[in-house]
Image: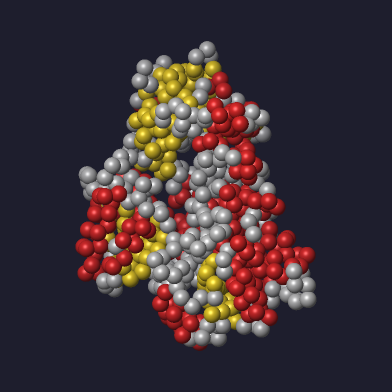
Amino acid sequence: MRARKEYRGHSPEILHYAQDDLLRGRFRFYFTTMRWQVKDSVTKEFLNKFPEIDPVILQLLWNRGVKVQEQIDEFLYPDYSQDIHDPFLFVEMRQAVERTLLAIRNKEKIMVHGDYDADGVCSALVVVSLLEALGANVDVYLPHRELEGYGLNLQSVDEFKKNGVNLIITTDCGISNHEEVKRVKKLGMDIIITDHHAEPPVLPEGTVAIINPHLKREIYPFRDLAGAGVAFKFVQAILKEIQIRPNEEYGIKPEEAETFEKWILDLVAIGTITDMMPIVGENRTLVKYGLIVLNKTRRIGLKKLIESLGGNKGKLYDVRTIAFQIGPRLNAAGRINHANQAYNLLKTENLDEVDNAVQNLNKTNEERQSISERVTTEVKEQIGEVGDRKVLFALGSDWPMGIVGLVAGKITDKFWRPTFVMVEKDGTISGSGRSIPEFDITSALQKAKKYLSRYGGHNGACGFTLKNKEVLGDFKKAIAKIAEEKLAEVILEPILEIDTETHLKKINWELFELLEKFSPFGKGNEHPRYLARGLRIDNLESVGSNGNHLRMMLSQGNGDRKKFIGFCLGDWCEKIKIGDNIDVVFEVDVNEWNGNRELQLKIIDLRLSEV
């Protein structure tokens, strides 16, 4: 196996396709240094094992850890009939389904408790859609981010009891709500938890069932489902059960179950992509088919929202549409106002209301962008020079809680350090954290849990509340110590992973068509990136309304020439000139205009050649 090659790139930009700026037609970028790292070459043994597959495809499969026939088939040819796992593989799915069907038959009142982000909104609607179709007495509750925070809270539990709720079903939350679950049981209600967040040291007691692929006890074969993915498995299990109960009448006939199941996949795709779940394994199949449904969605609110975005006429909506256009708007509701704004838009069937609802959601998103920019500037000023610090903290008093997670992410991207952004309000300090791959931020919170009243999250993102403001100093010291230990040997610079080196003569339509087999792209299956070295600049110019993009014609060897575009790289026109040799990391893309199509190589990073 060839040794891994590592280069230092000194591009002024990391193309960070930030949601807020992409919606305005431009890219956000950060000035930093990136390390270029070319992945190991595929082994001869692997090439010989699959002689019928193009070596280019095998290299990309190898890079993504797809190395056996079953994985290859699932990756290249996702098949809904084969690659969607049995929901009853979840240890407690059976009792969750039985209790829910009992509640439907007995007309008990069911409360679906979601979350305030896009995944939480979509997962709640996935469950509510089915329960309403089955004739259940069901309502939905989404907490207010500022006033209630994440997950269940004691006040809302008490309100559920007053309103006659018999069964609570959580989506995208609940796994850490010990006290709230105790309260549920004390008041005589039942609760089913569907969640996908990290397993806490102790699980809530007294639940009917907990459906979470991250539990150590689970045998479910895929662990990276989004909250909407877990909600979908719950819905899928109920639909499977009613198909084998012809004598029990529900609102959906057994023969209609499979059709209903597929029509909610647009919500599953939105939740999976917006929550940054890896687009591999079962998620890959769910997203692939979810995008098909999205492009013919029956949800009039979602249709109108997509129409309001413009710029995509005649093209299929893809992962980027969700990640950078639909997702930010749905998330903006919970960040600035209330998640009900997004939920109602996705659920509405009222044509008279939908136009106004879309306009309001777009305005909310614009407000979110403006506030986010202001808070990011203030946090940068507070942090100052980073120096040799391994972790960064910021604390404000007037920053909206719905924004601090976004801001923490931007600071992490800029300085490549775990970042905690906190807000003190009425004597209580709460915050959000974002991290780099080398530092499990939620695990760090677990080690510092004695300072926290509540916390939760994933490896790369977390939310938390301190027990009181007096422990702030000790909390920061504890986290800083953990970071010093975990990151002692880590070079705190982002790594630009490159799939392979190539020559321009190999970049053609045949390669592009092969690469299409790897879509949909996303986390865990990023768009393939190539490195070409020693390219001669035959022509260059700055383009765009402000001249902030770079367009070049580059050649290599015996006249192999290709067109390149570099978004937000226009200032390179002042640093390079015709005749210079450069190394370029790029993606193979297509430029379409007026019915014409041409290959376009999108620059991710570049540098002057060393030779």
Residue at horizontal 60 percent and vertical 73 percent from the top:
95
Residue 305 visible at all: no
Residue at horizontal 34 percent and vertical 30 percent from the top:
8
Count of residue discs: 0
Q: Where on the picture, by quarter, is residue 265?
A: bottom right
In the image, taking residue 609 as reference, residue 352 lies left or right, namely right
Q: Position of residue 416 (x, y in %)?
A: 33, 45
**Which one is in front, 60 or 409?**
60
**Which one is in front, 225 or 404?**
225
Residue sitting at the far top = 558
Q: Where on the picture, by quarter, is residue 103?
A: bottom right
Residue at horizontal 36 percent and vertical 55 percent from the top:
441
Q: Position of residue 521 (x, y in %)?
A: 55, 43
Q: Is residue 339 above or below residue 64?
A: below
In the image, taking residue 522 as reference, residue 488 lies left or right, namely left
Residue at horizontal 41 percent and vertical 65 percent from the top:
200
